[in-house]
Amino acid sequence: MTQPMFNWQIVREAFVPLLQGAQVTIEVALVTMLFATVAGIILGGASLSHFMPLRWLVKGYVLIVRGVPPLVLILLIYFAPPAFGIEIPQFWAAVIALGVNAAAYNTEIIRAGIVAIDPGQSEAASALGMTWTGTLMHVLLPQALRKTLPPLTNELIAVIKTTPLLSVISILELTGSGQAIVANTFAPLEVYVLLALFYFVLIGALSLVMRWLEWKFAQ
Amino acid sequence: MSYTWDWGVMAYAAPSMLRGTWVTIQMSIATMAFGTLIGAVMGTASLFKFWPTRALVATYVYTIRGIPLLVIIFLIYFALPAVGIYFSPVVAGLTALSIYSGAYMTEIFRAGILAIDRGQAEAAKAIGMTERMTLTTILLPQAARNIIPPVTNELIKVVKSTSLLSTITITELTRAAQLVVVQKFTPFEIYTMLACYYLVLIGTLSYLARLLDRWLKQ
């Protein structure tokens, strides 16, 4: 009798370590998204500024980040600073790399959200004598954030789908934990199928949240 | 903080990185070819009246969208041999990228066909065309126009995702750079250069895409 094709014992043993990996994935993704959203709001606002160099700076940043694969950003941010004698802790290198990437997309999302607001709103604000910053802070952003909540959730999903790349810089997030278990058990089939299921559930749940947000704001 | 930029290593790395760029381009083109094929077949299948086909396509699209590409690459390259299916790195990488990109292409094709005015399909039906004829002679040619801009976008995404193939020992651009870093210990220069290589490659593609887009709109 040969070995069974699918070893359920390994699935049971891998479950808890993978769950811990999933926790790291969620932590990294949430912290990344937090910073990237704040950066996106600042840069999204700046991209509509009247000051031309500021607009160009934001535009350049978005173009550069969009033209570089996230894996290259991760390699650059993790391996280059030590050449200057700067050691960034793994977790924060990960957050910076993913954050720089996601912030560029968030900038565009928030910019689009602000642009989509009826121009009458900012005209009314300026008629009332509000400053440009005041208009942005009190009139445009609150409305834009409501509209951009579904695409921002979508970006959170994109960030989660980028976190597996962190396994390359030996962070034990979900994929990294999976690889470590495979290295110990030599059971790639069981572990990677389970790994795929973990992501599927995680991302599926978030897609449902997004769908709900879209439905809620469509009303 | 003093740091002397090593210019020599950039010249040293150039030949292997250019070779890597060529592999990246080849893998991207092959992926796009298979991805478009999958997208065209699955996208039209998703509009059939026969519901099991629709359900099959929806399952494919949602499953792939819910799994990160790197995990799909690992499944095909590391997990399939356990059930006796062996692929070379290039075939495994190409399969993974095509299946992944194909799911997004399916949605692009579907949306492109759905965007066509209903009257077109109704008129075809009124003059007695079969469902298949309507699709191939009326809907798909018109859909091509809607589809080309998002397809060029997908091509840029594919170029960026080929960097993941470095994990399964395919010496495309990213792995070519990694190999130089291992030899020369100059991560700052090489990875900065790597980013520039991708920027030029993707910048050129976006520029061409914009030209194509403008031409299509005329």
Image (spheres, grey):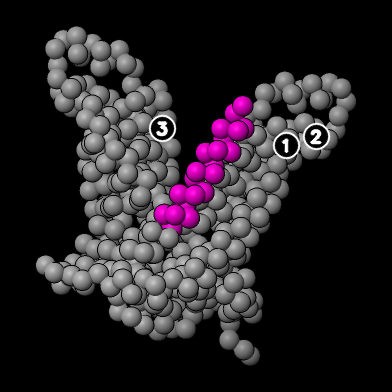
Q: Dot 3 corresponds to which residue?
A: A214
Which secondary structure, mark 1? helix
Quarter of the picture holding the C terminus of chain B: top right
Furthest residue toward left: B1
Q: Chain of mark 1?
A: B
Let me know if marks 2 and 3 both belong to one chain.
Answer: no
Q: Left of B5 or right of it: where is B116?
A: right
Would you say residue A174 is visible in this rendering?
no
Question: Looking at the image, which is closer to me, B53 or B107?
Answer: B107
Q: Pointer 1 and pointer 2: residues touching (CB < 8 Å)?
A: yes
Q: Position of residue A25 (x, y in %)?
A: 32, 60
Would you say residue A128 is visible in this rendering?
yes
Q: Chain of mark 3?
A: A
Q: Amino acid at mark 1?
A: Leu
Let me know if marks 1 and 2 both belong to one chain.
Answer: yes
Q: Residues within 10 Å of mark 1 (few under 14, many from 20)?
A: some
Residue B211 on the magenta segment: yes
